[in-house]
Image: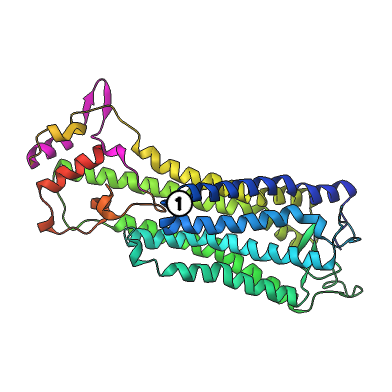
């Protein structure tokens, strides 16, 4: 049987989550405020999902701050427990519901990204999935949490309340009888484990891999020659590099907030012992989720905006005053040009590709690199417009 935590560990388990929960509360509130102050963003599915996710983080952060104060008074090995069975049930209900909801919404961003790029960010073609995303992310965890509360399977676990039987160890120790929590708790924990595995390890990486493969294989039917082909191929390589960086940031930050709790859980199951110091560390990372996801949200936007930073003014960037016949454009594009001592390629670094918050194909400088274009649609004017659009 696991040894009880000492007094210092009890206090750390009880109070260390609160400052990180407060930071997450502030961070998620800031994101919501940002979206409210930029209503144009909420016209896009990606930002609406971000908004709903952060509302869930606000509720989860409040439950984290409530923490040990919701645990029934007199519960062994919980410092500062002043609650009741009812407060524990409510807090555990919120913990279970929002933990799964936040993870589900974050995983849904991978689905949003995949269908957005597939339909070239024409939201009217995939907006119908939004109601099903909300039903999955909110409805299913809500129903599960209600069932857990109704069957008295929400009880003290660590320094808060979650899915557990009471008293601790009653499900594994034949000498200890359970006061609360039915035999269904084992089934519930299996359901939670399977659900989290699917949400964390199956859905996001599979959709991100499918997205990358789709972009990698997507090429226009028309294959221009000479310098224009070089621009297209170089731009596609840059696009795929940007996509890979965005996917990596999205997945690694998501897994980072859970990996230490997973390690602690596995070690406890294998050894039968709780490593309380590591548990405290894992909780601080997990309870920082709102802060970490806020940083990721703005970093993804920053990665996109970095692509539109200004380059030195070049004749190509003043394309409206230059010759625009096809031969001249191809000739200029096929060579590397040096202006004012700066060695650069013609303006293609002025745009970047976002897999989460892209623009519809008619206004995106990347459209010609991923769209299917027929021969009769390609002429000198399109090449001229592409260069001017990338430059300005």
User: x%, y% of residue 252?
Assistant: 54, 50
Residue closer to the observer: 277 or 124: 124
User: Taking 335 as reference, is 126 above or below it?
Assistant: below
Instruction: Please give left or right for residue 66 compared with residue 210 in the image.
Output: right
Residue 194: say if magenta.
no
User: x%, y% of residue 311?
Assistant: 30, 30
Q: Residue at x 87, y 72 (%)?
A: 173
Residue closer to the observer: 33 or 378: 33
User: x%, y% of residue 387?
Assistant: 20, 41
User: Taking 251 as reference, is 333 above or below it?
Assistant: above
Instruction: Kindly indicate the quadrant of the structure image that contains residue 42.
Output: bottom left
Instruction: Please give left or right for residue 37 compared with residue 177 in the image.
Output: left
Quadrant in which the C terminus is drawn: top left
Q: Which residues are magenta?
A: 326-353
Q: Is residue 209 visible?
A: no
Instruction: Please give left or right for residue 228 compared with residue 174 in the image.
Output: left
Q: Residue at x 44, y 63 (%)?
A: 111
* Residue under numbered circle 1: 247
User: Taking 62 as reference, is 136 above or below it?
Assistant: below
Q: Residue furthest top?
A: 340
Quadrant in which the N terminus is drawn: bottom right
User: x%, y% of residue 66?
Assistant: 76, 55
User: Taking 105 as reference, is 327 above or below it?
Assistant: above
Instruction: Please give left or right for residue 41 compared with residue 383 in the image.
Output: right
Classify mark 1: residues with Cα within 10 Å, few (<14), some (14-19) or many (20+).
many
Q: Is residue 93 visible?
A: yes
Q: How is the image coloured?
A: rainbow
Mark 1, secondary structure of its residue = helix
Q: Residue at x 23, y 51 (%)?
A: 368
């Amino acid at each position: 049987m696991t040894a009880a935590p000492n007094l210092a560990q009890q206090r750390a388990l009880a109070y260390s989550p609160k400052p990180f929960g407060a930071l997450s509360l502030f961070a998620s509130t800031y994101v919501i405020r940002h979206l409210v102050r930029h209503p144009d963003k909420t016209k896009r599915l990606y930002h609406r999902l971000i908004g709903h996710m952060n509302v869930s983080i606000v509720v989860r952060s409040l439950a984290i701050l409530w923490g040990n104060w919701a645990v029934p008074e007199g519960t062994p090995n919980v410092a500062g427990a002043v609650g009741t069975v009812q407060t524990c049930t409510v807090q555990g209900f919120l913990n279970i519901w929002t933990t799964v909801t936040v993870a589900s919404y974050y995983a849904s961003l991978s689905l949003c990204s995949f269908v957005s790029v597939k339909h070239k960010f024409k939201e009217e073609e995939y907006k119908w999935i939004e109601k099903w995303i909300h039903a999955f992310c909110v409805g299913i965890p809500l129903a599960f949490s209600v069932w857990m509360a109704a069957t008295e399977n929400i009880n003290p676990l660590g320094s808060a309340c979650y899915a557990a039987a009471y008293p601790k160890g009653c499900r594994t120790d034949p000498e200890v009888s359970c006061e609360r929590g039915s035999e269904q708790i084992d089934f519930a924990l299996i359901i939670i484990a399977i659900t989290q595995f699917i949400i964390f390890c199956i859905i996001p990486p599979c959709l991100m891999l499918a997205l990358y493969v789709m972009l990698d294989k997507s090429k226009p039917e028309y294959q221009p020659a000479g310098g224009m082909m070089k621009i297209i191929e170089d731009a596609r390589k840059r696009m795929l590099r940007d996509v890979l960086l965005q996917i990596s940031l999205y997945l690694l930050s998501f897994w980072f907030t859970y990996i230490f709790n997973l390690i602690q859980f596995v070690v406890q199951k294998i050894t039968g012992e709780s490593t309380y110091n590591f548990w405290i560390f894992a909780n601080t990372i997990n309870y920082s989720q709102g802060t970490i996801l806020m940083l990721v949200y703005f970093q993804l936007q920053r990665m996109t905006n970095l692509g539109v930073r200004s380059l030195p003014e070049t004749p190509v960037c003043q394309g409206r005053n230059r010759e625009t016949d096809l031969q001249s454009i191809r000739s200029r594009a096929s060579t590397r040009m040096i202006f004012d001592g700066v060695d650069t390629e013609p303006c293609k670094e002025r745009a970047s590709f976002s897999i989460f918050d892209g623009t519809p194909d008619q206004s995106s400088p990347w459209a010609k690199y991923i769209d299917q274009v027929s021969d009769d649609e390609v002429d000198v004017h399109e090449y001229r417009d592409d260069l001017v659009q990338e430059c300005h």
